Amino acid sequence: MPDLEHELRKAVRGDVGFDVASRALVTMDASNYRRVPIGVVAPRDAADVAAVLEVCRERGVPVVPRGGGTSIAGQATGVGVVLDFTRHMNRLLSLDPGARTAVVQPGLVLDRLQEAAAPHGLRFGPDPSTHSRCTLGGMIGNNSCGSHSVAWGTTADSVRELDVLTARGERLRLGREWRGAPDGLRSLVDGESARLRTGFPELPRRISGYALDALLPENGADVARSFCGSEGTLGVLTEAVVSLVEAPRARALAVLGYADETAAAEAAAGLLPYGPLTAEGMAADLVPSPAGLPRGGAWLFVETGGESAGEARARAEAIVRAADVVDAMVVTDGAGQRALWRVREDASGTATRMPDGSEAWPGWEDCAVPPARLGAYLRDFRALLAAHGLRGTPYGHFGDGCIHVRIDFDLLTAAGVARFRRFSEELAELVTAHGGSLSGEHGDGQARAELLPTMYGADMVALFERAKGVWDPDDLLNPGMLVRPAPLDSGLRFSVLPREPVDVAFGYPGDGGDFPAAVRRCVGVAKCRTTTAAGPAVMCPSFRVTGEERHSTRGRARLLHEMLAGELVTDGWRSQEVREALDLCLSCKGCRSDCPVGVDMATYKAEFLHHHYAGRRRPAAHYSMGRLPVWLRWASRTRAVPLLNALARTRPVAWAVKRAAGIAPERTIPRLARETFSRWWRRGRPAPGEGELVVLWPDTFTEHLSPSVGRAAVRVLEAAGLRVALPPTLRMRGRPVGDARSRSALRLLTARRGRVCCGLTYVSTGQLDHARVVLRRTLDLMEPVLETGAPVVVLEPSCAAALRTDLPDLLPDDPRAARLAARVLTFAETLERHAPDWTPPRLDRPAVGQTHCHQHAVLGDAPDRRLREAAGLTGEPVGGCCGLAGDFGFEKGHFEVSERCAQEQLLPAVREAPPGAVVLADGYSCRTQLEQLAGVRGRHLAEVLAEALEEGSGEAGSGASGPFGASEASGASGASGI
């Protein structure tokens, strides 16, 4: 609608987006539903909101307010103009510690309010699991609750006053005693007071429908409270005054183990008299690993508070004594409590996959019943699931009788959708029979509004419609929600996806080889939209820099979804909208581990680039940095390294090279090593030792750019009693002779020389056909190694991650790929597993650094932590990403984002490091970023340990060489011995 867009651009100061990408990013929330809006407006202030309402009212275009887009019932989607409050109207306007109030804009993320309140000993009471990205406006719209609702209630309990604009442009200040009520609302309530006094169930988590009973005189005629939970259908919130509560000075967490979830549910209500802050429940099928939890098949997480740690612990221990449990534990340290809460908070994403990997979906995400009836309800609920042949994993707020669950509905076929409807209708009757509410937290939206007559009866629902008419007589605001709803089985987001398999390069083993299923992993819980990296987390660095939805993992997944749908994004793999969104993806793989459902956007990006540039010219950076191993080998073979280094330091030449190669002009071209690691190895290695054989992988970065890391690793591995060899460099033609151990002069003469390579640079730039060629050649070279039991030690974390995951995913039909992937170990893993009795030298120094993104996401760093601890290196690595991320930070147009990623955590940590601190950086990218942005030399852990060994012994490292390395030096180049 070009006229509408034109009028909005004239009328508002905020951002107006009617382009394909802007619309595609908000077609979905965290529900099963999808609606394509006309456009998106990010207002700057209330005047902008009023202008949007006026323009849209004149044209009869619906308006849909949207916060963080984490709604699970579909209420944050719409076909009109979507108001995005997260971009500009996201401020904390004031905080009054004395009055314990705060004035907030609707787009303010909850965690930002909590951070501002914490220094005053205060907090906002409700805290949904999405607290790091949900907004106050969304919480008010849904009347959100969270895990502490047993102590501090729902959002409605924390709202004092609301500034609201009606669809007809009236500005209202809502409060108690009918303050701000629109004309006609009081007379409506007065005429229906008897119905309002008897028509609502009494339970702590009744969120369904409009809270018209809050308007009764005995409830203070609280118009602001009544507005909570109206899902953007009555008015548009522009500002709120909210109450804060005093935060306990100390907390303790009692984790109570029970035989099953029913036992845990029945126990929860009995613990409420002890005044807990929380009483959360979850079963074993939601816990990837029960390590660290008490024995049991289900657990209650019961938090207590106190003026001191002792008081909080005493209250927790009293609850343990009162509880009839299988096992229990009390956790008082903050780190331990946070780790346990992360397990619970990630359940909303974890639950989207059943234990066997099949998909599960919301829709009946948060029914609530009186807490005393929760055990009985869960038994009946399980029976209903079984009757329909469905599975689900309940968890949630057991102390409030509120259950979250994702169910393995088949929402892809007509028969499956029909069963979804039948189950929904029967479950609504079951919840009502237990005196419950269809929604106990997330609202009705489209998922449950159609079934409100089951809970409230037709007359009460008709009253809801009349109330909507008082507030919004033109039905302009979020139509199809709460009243006159769209059918619960219409507009499902899966219906637009292709039914035929999509031809892809990766194997997607976790999704049955189905790329649309991989994209469906993103359910919209938006953990990627956090504005700060918590703890060791990495995801999503580009979003934290730009704050734009398209640069979040969720945003990119939404665009891929729309690309597959082909309705809005119509040019498939050639889509410029998708390419532009993926351009700032660092391929850090942080989402692979930090996303609760394991979205792997780095792999999706590589897949997209592979198709997008098929048969077309690629960006210059793909040829220069994407094929870096080729250029570096060429430079080494032609002995051109000194000349190239000199030219790279000549400004005009460097400028021309960077321009031609697509390298950011702000970058310095790294120096190449004058002697490669392999050449150093061949220069005369002493005789091999007698220890266990390990094969050291000469990755491109170690080989040509940081051979000191390889030399240091050899020194340490040998000191640990291991026998080091390098992979072969000759690839034999034909079948092995005899027993595969004998030599043949003819085979040696016809062998082909080559170098192993993980293919990382080809994968990250989407050159997947080339990557497969390189990886097959590598497997051919590695066959003699695979015939041994030797582990393969990879020093560069990104290369190790590529071998562990990309190799088997790209060559799923080659059994050698899985065998090599299983052999890959990091430096620390090798020492821990194959030299367990070796004691590293003690350094007793502080260390600072950042775990490499790929190591965090794919490999894990627990062995590294233990090795550092054994060596006396103290200090915790920071989270986030260094920002260089392979070729990303070098590519033209990426420097600013790359630098800001580094400034988030890594560079401040280095600047604030204590004197004498060791700067650890196992990844070449991380070391380069540190050198170029901070002038600091980061070192691989192997280098630090090798230096300590030299200082301790005063002698050069003894040499050793295995069968691969010895034959390479002799001229057979590794073609032998095996």
Image: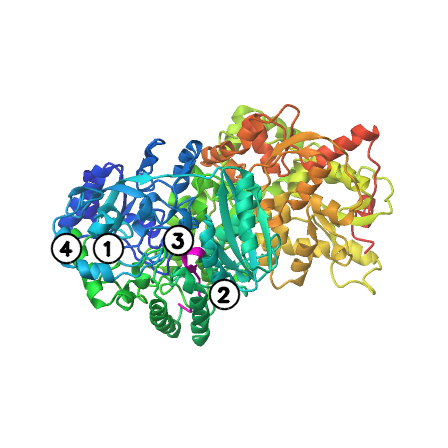
Residue 593 in view: no
Of the two numbered discs 4 and 3 in the rendering, the one whose residue sits closer to the viewer: 4
User: Tag 3 or tag 1, which sits nearer the N-term?
Assistant: 1
How far apart marks 2 and 4 lie (CA) works out to 43 Å
How many numbered discs sit on the rendered protein? 4
Of the two numbered discs 3 and 2 in the rendering, the one whose residue sits closer to the viewer: 2
Instruction: Look at 50% across and 48% down and name the residue there.
Output: 303
Judged left or right of residue 684, residue 391 is left
How far apart marks 4 and 3 lie (CA) works out to 46 Å
Instruction: Look at 58% across and 46% down and name the residue there.
Output: 331
Magenta residues? 399-411
From the top left corner, tell me how far across and down residue 398 is, in percent: 45, 58
6 or 942: nearer the eye?
942
The reply to whether the magenta stretch includes residue 402 is yes
**Circle 1 Cα neighbour tier, 10 Å, few/some/many (<14 / 14–19 / ≥20):** many
The residue singled out by tag 3 in the image is 558
The residue singled out by tag 4 in the image is 190
Please, what is the three-letter code of the amino acid marked with disc 4? Asp
The residue singled out by tag 1 in the image is 213
Please, what is the three-letter code of the amino acid marked with disc 3? Arg
User: Tag 3 or tag 4, which sits nearer the N-term?
Assistant: 4
Which element is circle 2 on? helix
Which element is circle 3 on? helix
How far apart marks 1 and 3 lie (CA) works out to 39 Å
Judged left or right of residue 678, residue 554 is left
The residue singled out by tag 2 in the image is 262
The reply to whether the magenta stretch includes residue 481 is no
Please, what is the three-letter code of the amino acid marked with disc 2? Thr
762 or 643: nearer the eye?
762
